[in-house]
Amino acid sequence: MSVHPSAWLVLEDGTAFAGNAIGASGEAFGEAVFHTGMSGYQEILTDPSYKGQIVCMTYPHIGNYGVNEEDVESRRPWVEGFVVRDLSPIASNHRATETLDAYLKRHGIVAISGVDTRALTLILRQQGSLKAVVSTTESDPHKLLKRVRASKDIVGIDLVKDVTADKAYEWPATSTASGARKRITVMDFGVKRNILRHLASRGFHVTVVPARTSASEVLQTKPNGVLLSNGPGDPAAVTYAVETIRKLMGQVPMMGICLGHQLLGLAYGGETFKLKFGHHGANHPVQDLGTGKVEITSQNHNFAVRVESIPGGKVALTHKNLNDGTVEGMRHTELPIFSIQYHPEASPGPHDACYLFDRFVESVNGGRK
């Protein structure tokens, strides 16, 4: 096994971690966050919602099952940088086509191993998410500290424009199930492919459109329903999407996921706010207030909706986070619109949240609001 050159992870508070360079050579700046999942690193790397972030995996041993081309959630990895404790030098899985290290190199992702990721996680929990840099080219952490403090914060930055599709495309139905070949238009703020797979498996023919698609252009696709996808960053910076959503309200049933949920909150006239260290993991307990059931959910977001800030009394809370009480779901009481903050297309439960796609089918078919 070859010896990796040294690398540094430096936080804006001055904390510096020395480690081993893995992945691509260079420097990567972003907001440091931690993910509590034991596996799923390929989904994390290719989730467009992680644009702008340096992801620390809290589980110590990463990379043992390698990487394959079937499990990606988008066309490329989007994380700015990647931090692990121990990187497996081999891929022990019959589906693997390459090692994690080779995959990171091929896609230009700067990464570091040998970091005390539990110590890093404690810092982020206590102080909140911090700007950070991973560098394999600079040996002086003091110089890196100056550069990271001068780097941009994600608040107020539109990251959706970097991850959305360049043009519209089709995702055909894969069954003749309950969707009955109806059409769903997905507004792509950074959509994960498994969302499209869930819609297609329910008989929907899906059209995916770029984030800046106008309301009139969305309606020209003749949708029976519109899904507002997940995506990265600060929802308040995506003003054009908020305006489009407002114009679509009452025109067609809608479902929002993650960033789509937050954009709906803004379109209702409410407020969003930045969480201290965000929700990033595959084990967040969420309660469905309608049934009382608790779901184990996958989450990835730094912002949340203040449901109490929405005027008019026409939006009801449907789900809440049992760790911190934040909003995890809401519905309009008069229009067929609902949304959730977490990711029902991911499967930590493994099937806890799949009913939400079935609920969307009911809504599109003229049933549940």
Image (cartoon, grey):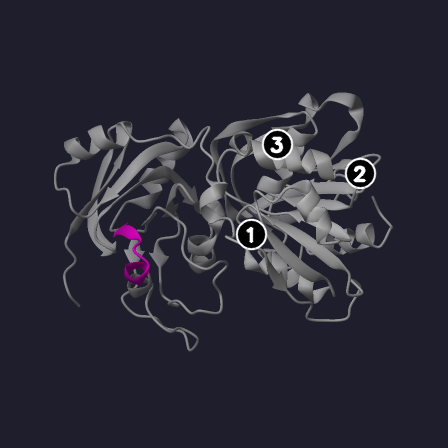
Question: Could you tell whether 253 is left or right of 148 in the image?
Answer: right
Please report whichever mark, 3 or 2, sits nearer to the chain's N-terminal start. Answer: 2
Marks 3 and 1, how far apart in space? 23 Å
Residue 116, horizontal then vertical, whole percent: 28, 45
Residue pointed to by mark 1: 191
What residue is shown at x 25% (from left), y 55% (from top)? 24
Residue pointed to by mark 3: 326
Instruction: Say what secondary structure mark 1 lies in.
Output: loop
Marks 1 and 2, how far apart in space? 23 Å
Mark 1 packing: few (<14 Cα in 10 Å), some, or many (20+)? many
Tell whether position 109 is magenta: yes
Residue pointed to by mark 2: 250
Question: Could you tell whether 36 is left or right of 295 in the image?
Answer: left
Residue range corresponding to the magenta coloring: 104-112
Of the 4 image quadrants, the one containing the C terminus is top right
Q: Amino acid at mark 3?
A: Thr
Quarter assignment of residue 12:
top left
Question: Could you tell whether 110 is left or right of 258 in the image?
Answer: left
Mark 2 packing: few (<14 Cα in 10 Å), some, or many (20+)? few
Q: Amino acid at mark 2?
A: Gly
Residue 132, horizontal then vertical, whole percent: 30, 36
In-front residue for pair 242/278: 242
